[in-house]
Image: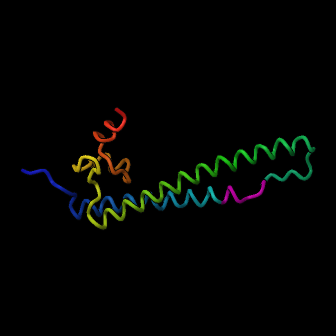
């Protein structure tokens, strides 16, 4: 029997469901991080000594910087998931962009936005 060149419509529907769930969770996380970045110091430092205020300000700045980095990563992840949905729509989802072979179902379930098979990914670092 010849190897399949693409996943079936039923398989694509299953992957789409997985991606939509991950996309919803990713958007919720992104929105949470954005709120963290925009929020003022919730603990309030108006009644503390000035030495503690400057330490607290530095800590708050560091937390916002970390949240900003996480938000940027989350935004990239969301874009990758949305691009995977486009590939599902044009029925090219699950095809390795390097080898042209189908990406293993287990890999797609673990990393649904991937565009490379494990073989291609390993060869990338040789």
User: Compared with residue 64, is residue 8 higher up or lower down, i.e. above or below?
Assistant: below
Name the residue at 86% across, 50% down.
45
Q: Is residue 110 left or right of residue 5?
A: right
Q: Is residue 34 left or right of residue 116?
A: right
Counting labels gives 0
- In percent of width and height, residue 61 lies at 74, 48
Residue situated furthest left in the rendering: 1
Is 36 within the magenta?
Answer: yes
Q: Residue at x 34, y 38 (%)?
A: 124
Residue at the far top in the pictured view: 126
Front in this rendered view, residue 25 or 116: 116
**Is residue 115 in the magenta section?**
no
Q: Which residues are magenta?
A: 35-41
Residue 28 rendering spot, x and y as whole percentages = 55, 60
Up/down of 27 relative to 122, above or below: below
Query: Residue most toward the bottom?
Result: 89
The quadrant in which residue 119 appears is top left
The residue located at (33%, 36%) in the rendering is 122
Q: Which residue is drawn at the image coordinates 81% and 47% (left, top)?
A: 57
The image quadrant where one finds the C terminus is top left
In-front residue for pair 15/70: 70
């Amino acid at each position: 029997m010849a190897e399949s060149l693409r996943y079936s419509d039923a398989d694509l529907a299953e992957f789409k469901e997985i991606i939509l769930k991950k996309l919803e969770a990713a958007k919720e996380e992104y929105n949470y991080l954005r709120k963290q970045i925009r929020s003022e110091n919730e603990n309030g430092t108006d009644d503390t000594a000035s030495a503690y205020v400057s330490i607290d300000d530095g800590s708050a700045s560091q937390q916002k910087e970390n949240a900003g980095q996480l938000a940027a990563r989350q935004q990239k992840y969301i874009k990758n998931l949305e691009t995977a949905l486009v590939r599902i729509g044009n029925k090219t989802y699950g095809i390795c962009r390097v080898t042209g072979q189908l990406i293993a179902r287990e890999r797609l379930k673990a990393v649904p936005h991937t565009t490379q098979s494990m073989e291609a990914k390993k060869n990338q670092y040789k």
